[in-house]
């Protein structure tokens, strides 16, 4: 049977955007919810998987060694139309069943059970429920295009025909904000989910992705995850289910405890980060339930935007150095001659003079003329 | 991941860990610490008194083991020891297991359920935020 997958990610009805990305695209322990869902669909045997993402092209996940779905990015207005077209394309390509996921949260549904239920009940469309609420996960018979169309046009709220539901009893995380992101990382690292952290185990409970740099003297306590090309500098401690995502940097002596460091984040030296989610120059403290915008780049910074500029700036400075020196030598203003010692003695310091009402008496006396210019030398060797 | 076949040394810590007993304990464990990639487990089940010297000794052992690419893990800490470790914020520097057996097994395989995780799941995070 030809089964294909369609994953939708949009911001409608979601309130959990952190670090500028929809939660389903934020990487947690090496992979985003989209990549994990795609992996599960592939494991099940889905022939083709498409993802429709609301937002700019940069939102589409880059290939980090994981075979991702075919991503289509679109605007908010065109989202549902594009999703419907993507469904139609899957059907045209020969799909008999389409598994439709709208990713807000992450659910590890039993796909085999869902498909079996769908076939046994001869459903046109079947849905997954979790307790009393319905999840936006559907199994749609490809031949029922009108049912699918009505589903897309109602933004997955209404189905034209009966839509029996199959109950999900496995892992579920709504990914509604930093708290859920953190809990997701904890659940992955403590193996409460079927999906596993990315990378390879360095030692029991510590997963490290290729390209990560862990300096000597840094301490990693299980369970922990270090993403690709992340740097953990000397003296840093990564402990208690902490995940440091790709291209992040933890500077010397910083302790990161029970926290998620999102991709391209820099955490400064000598800090103590606990029970937090750090990303895009923000720190979400889970204990205090607050998000702090950290402006000081020495504490927390976002590396993605600045690294290119930094490189460009350094290159420009390097190239401009020699011509600048030549220009200054030829046309630059001459340096002012330093006032001689006696003139300097007569001038009252502006900071001491009018501002404080203090007049330096010695400076204005004629006695200053009696001192020669070698006074400083005389004082230096005053004991001789 | 390599298969771990090196021995794991388990030492039970004394009831009272003060400056004197800490020194004696350190003298006892030093031969194990100076081996290549030492793997040690300290059993804290008997500890009823742990002072700053004891905590310092634990940190010194941990850093010695770490310097030689080894590790020191703690097992079944008593309530008193747990309180002191939390108070001094040193508990996060150690992997702490419910029993010595689990701590020993953790050198060759990840045992998330055997780890002390009271801080992770003390209360559901959703409730904490609400």
Image (cartoon, coloured by chain):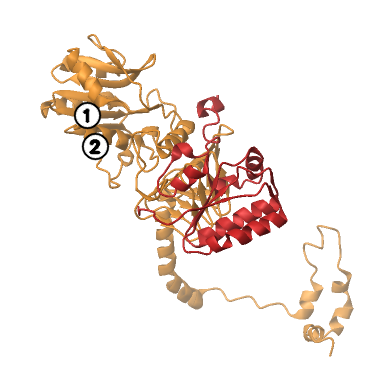
Chain colours: A orange, B red
Residue A281 visible, this angle:
no
Q: Name the chain letter of the residue that bears numbered label 2.
A: A
Q: Nearer the viewer, residue A378 or A14?
A: A14
Quadrant containing the N terminus of chain A in the rendered view:
top left
Q: Chain of mark 1?
A: A
Residue A350 in the image: x percent, y percent? 77, 63
Q: Which residue is mark 2?
A: A69
- Which residue in the rendered view is the most extreme toward the bottom? A384
Examine the rendered structure and indicate whether residue A238 appears above or below residue B36: above
**In the rendered image, the vertical position of residue A299 relative to residue A282, given as above or below:** below
Mark 2 and mark 1 in contact (Cβ < 8 Å)? yes
Camera-side residue of A188 and A233: A188
Residue A45, percent across and down? 19, 32
Q: Position of residue A161 (x, y in %)?
A: 22, 9
Q: Is residue A271 left or right of residue B102?
A: right
Which quadrant is the C terminus of chain A positioned in?
A: bottom right
Query: Is A84 left or right of B112, judged from the image as shown?
Result: left
Mark positioned earlier in the residue sequence (1 or 2): 1
Is A360 rendered above or below residue A13? Answer: below
- Residue A258, percent from left and from top: 51, 41
Question: Callout 2: helix, strand or loop?
Answer: loop
Dot 1 lies on which element?
strand
**Residue at the image point whose x is 79% and y is 84% from the top:** A380
- Whether residue B110 is visible to the viewer of this picture, yes or no, is yes
Separation of residues labelled 1 and 2 (CA atoms): 9 Å
Q: Is residue A223 left or right of residue A117?
A: right
Please tell me which residue is depicted at 44% across the width and 52% down the height of the picture: A306
How many marks can you see? 2
Q: Kindly identify which residue carries mark 1.
A: A5
Give me the disc on residue A282. Answer: none
Splitting the image into 4 quarters, where does residue B78 fall? top right
Task: Tell if the residue under mark 1 belongs to the same chain as the one under mark 2.
Answer: yes
């Amino acid at each position: 049977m030809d089964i294909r997958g369609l994953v939708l990610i949009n911001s409608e009805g979601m309130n959990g955007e952190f670090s500028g990305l929809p939660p389903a695209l934020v990487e947690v322990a090496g992979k985003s919810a989209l990549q994990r869902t795609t992996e599960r669909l592939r494991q099940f045997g889905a022939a083709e998987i498409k993802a429709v993402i609301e937002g700019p092209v940069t939102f589409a996940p880059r290939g980090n060694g994981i075979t991702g779905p075919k991503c289509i990015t679109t605007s908010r207005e065109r989202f549902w139309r594009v999703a419907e077209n993507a469904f139609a394309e899957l059907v045209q390509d020969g799909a008999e069943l389409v598994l439709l996921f709208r990713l807000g949260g992450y659910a590890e549904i039993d796909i085999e059970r869902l498909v079996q239920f769908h076939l046994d009940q001869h459903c046109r469309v079947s849905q997954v429920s979790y307790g009393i609420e319905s999840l936006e996960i559907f199994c749609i018979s490809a031949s029922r295009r009108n049912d699918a169309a009505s589903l897309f046009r109602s933004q997955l709220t209404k189905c034209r025909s009966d839509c029996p539901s199959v109950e999900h009893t496995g892992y579920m995380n709504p990914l509604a904000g930093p708290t859920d992101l953190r809990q997701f990382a904890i659940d992955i690292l403590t193996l409460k989910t079927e999906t596993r952290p990315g990378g390879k185990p360095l030692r029991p409970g510590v997963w490290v992705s290729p390209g990560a740099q862990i300096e000597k003297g840094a301490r990693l306590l299980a369970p922990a995850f270090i993403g690709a090309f992340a740097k953990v500098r000397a003296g840093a401690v990564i402990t208690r289910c902490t995940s440091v995502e790709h291209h992040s940097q933890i500077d010397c002596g910083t302790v990161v405890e029970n926290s998620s460091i999102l991709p391209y984040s820099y955490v400064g030296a000598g800090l103590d980060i606990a029970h937090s989610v750090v990303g895009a120059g923000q720190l979400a403290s889970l204990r205090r339930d607050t998000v702090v915008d950290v402006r000081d780049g020495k504490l927390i910074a976002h590396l993605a935007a600045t690294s290119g500029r930094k490189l460009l700036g350094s290159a420009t400075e390097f190239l401009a150095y020699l011509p600048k020196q030549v220009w200054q030598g030829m046309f630059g203003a001459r340096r002012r001659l330093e006032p001689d010692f006696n003139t300097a003695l007569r001038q009252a310091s502006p900071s001491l003079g009018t501002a404080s009402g203090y007049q330096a008496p010695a400076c204005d006396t004629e006695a200053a003329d009696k001192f020669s210019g070698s006074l400083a030398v005389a004082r230096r060797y005053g004991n001789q | 991941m390599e298969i771990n076949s090196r021995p794991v040394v388990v030492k039970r810590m004394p009831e009272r860990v003060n400056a004197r007993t800490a020194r004696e304990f350190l003298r006892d464990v030093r031969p194990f610490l100076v081996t290549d990639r030492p793997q040690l487990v300290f059993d804290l089940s008997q500890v009823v008194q742990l002072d700053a010297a004891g905590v310092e000794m634990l940190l010194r052992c941990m850093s010695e083991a770490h310097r030689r690419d080894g590790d020191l893990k703690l097992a079944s800490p008593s309530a008193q020891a747990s309180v002191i470790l939390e108070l001094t914020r040193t508990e996060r520097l150690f992997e702490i297991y419910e029993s010595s057996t689990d701590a020993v097994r953790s050198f060759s395989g990840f045992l998330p359920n055997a780890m002390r995780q009271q801080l992770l799941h003390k209360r559901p995070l959703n409730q904490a935020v609400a």
